[in-house]
Image (cartoon, rainbow, N blue to C red):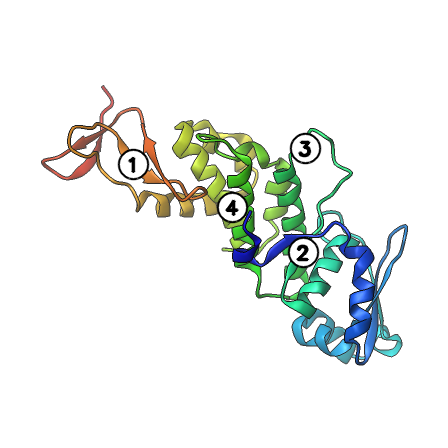
């Protein structure tokens, strides 16, 4: 994955090394801590934190206990608030760079791309919770690149999307780029495999926000549909993940050159 284009990179030691970086940038500081076994404390610039995170701006200006103690204790929330995601968000607040920490505790059978998507979703949801914006598109693009780098020619990347990813994406705002990236993976799967079961599964219908995003991305993909060239019988369409043309072979779909449109044949 080309991190120079997205501004997104990985740093497995970010949580441990963040304190050393923060001490060189301090003005008035507040302590941010996640309730966990280690309970690591991050000493963060109050000015930067409140400028870029509306959630903390209200907290420190609204007469809450946190404003008196200059300390925030965050409840750990699975898939949203963790030391890794908080460290990623704090680093972005300081440097406008996103460094993801991939979970090393997941099963060895879990692909690197699956773990990458998990980390990206966690940061996206944390940023949304705290009102931090500015890197959503880059995060989505990094997911697309990760999907591309993990799949062979003809693969769809859908095998890297878990039900937990789908459930987590439901909590993002409408039109969020990260959920769109997941939706594009489903669309790419349909275009590559022509398997309508991808869309009709009970698993997918359980997540209406993602399903609606898939419909929107399908419509966008259809705008790239090209009729067969002379001497050929297949259509081409742009894969929204790999951004390359792929052959579309839908049963019952025929092209009428005289009418310059698509028709369905049920014979």
- Asked whether, in this view, residue 80 is left or right of residue 221, the answer is right
Tell me if label 2 and label 1 are in contact, CB under 8 Å: no
User: Separation of disc 4 and disc 2 at Cα?
Assistant: 16 Å
Image quadrant for the C terminus?
Answer: top left
Sequence-earlier tag: 4 or 3: 3
The structure residue drawn at horizontal position 22% and vertical position 25%, both measured from the top left corner, is 265
Sequence-earlier tag: 4 or 2: 2
Q: Give how far across and how far down residue 116 sits, in percent.
A: 64, 44
The structure residue drawn at horizontal position 36% and vertical position 48%, both measured from the top left corner, is 220
Element at label 4: helix
User: Separation of disc 4 and disc 1 at Cα?
Assistant: 21 Å
Q: On the image, numbered disc 2 is attached to which residue?
A: 99
Q: Give how far across and how far down residue 185 sits, in percent.
A: 49, 40
Element at label 1: strand
Q: On the image, numbered disc 4 is attached to which residue?
A: 144
Residue 110's tag is 3
Sequence-earlier tag: 4 or 1: 4
């Amino acid at each position: 994955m080309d991190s120079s284009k997205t501004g997104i990179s990985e740093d497995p030691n970010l949580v441990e090394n963040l304190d050393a970086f923060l001490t060189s940038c301090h003005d008035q500081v507040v302590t941010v801590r996640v309730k966990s076994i280690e309970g690591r404390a991050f000493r963060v610039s109050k000015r930067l934190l409140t400028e870029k995170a509306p959630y903390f701006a209200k907290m420190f200006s609204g007469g809450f206990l946190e404003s008196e103690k200059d300390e925030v204790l965050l409840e750990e929330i699975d898939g949203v608030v963790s030391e890794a995601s908080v460290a990623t968000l704090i680093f972005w607040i300081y440097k406008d760079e996103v460094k993801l920490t991939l979970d090393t505790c997941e099963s060895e059978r879990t692909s690197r791309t699956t773990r990458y998507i998990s980390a990206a979703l966690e940061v996206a949801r944390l940023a949304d919770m705290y009102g931090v914006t500015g890197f959503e598109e880059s995060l989505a693009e990094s997911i697309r690149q990760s999907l591309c780098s993990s799949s062979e020619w003809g693969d769809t990347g859908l095998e890297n999307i878990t039900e937990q990813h789908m459930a987590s994406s439901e909590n993002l705002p409408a039109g969020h780029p990260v959920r769109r990236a997941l939706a594009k993976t489903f669309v790419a799967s349909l275009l590559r495999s022509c398997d309508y079961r991808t869309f009709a599964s009970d698993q997918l219908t359980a997540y209406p926000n993602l399903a609606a995003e898939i419909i929107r991305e399908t419509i966008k993909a259809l705008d790239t549909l090209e009729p067969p060239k002379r001497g050929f019988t297949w259509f081409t369409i742009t894969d929204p993940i790999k951004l390359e043309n792929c052959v579309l072979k839908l049963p019952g779909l025929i092209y009428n050159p005289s009418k310059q449109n698509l028709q369905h044949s049920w014979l």
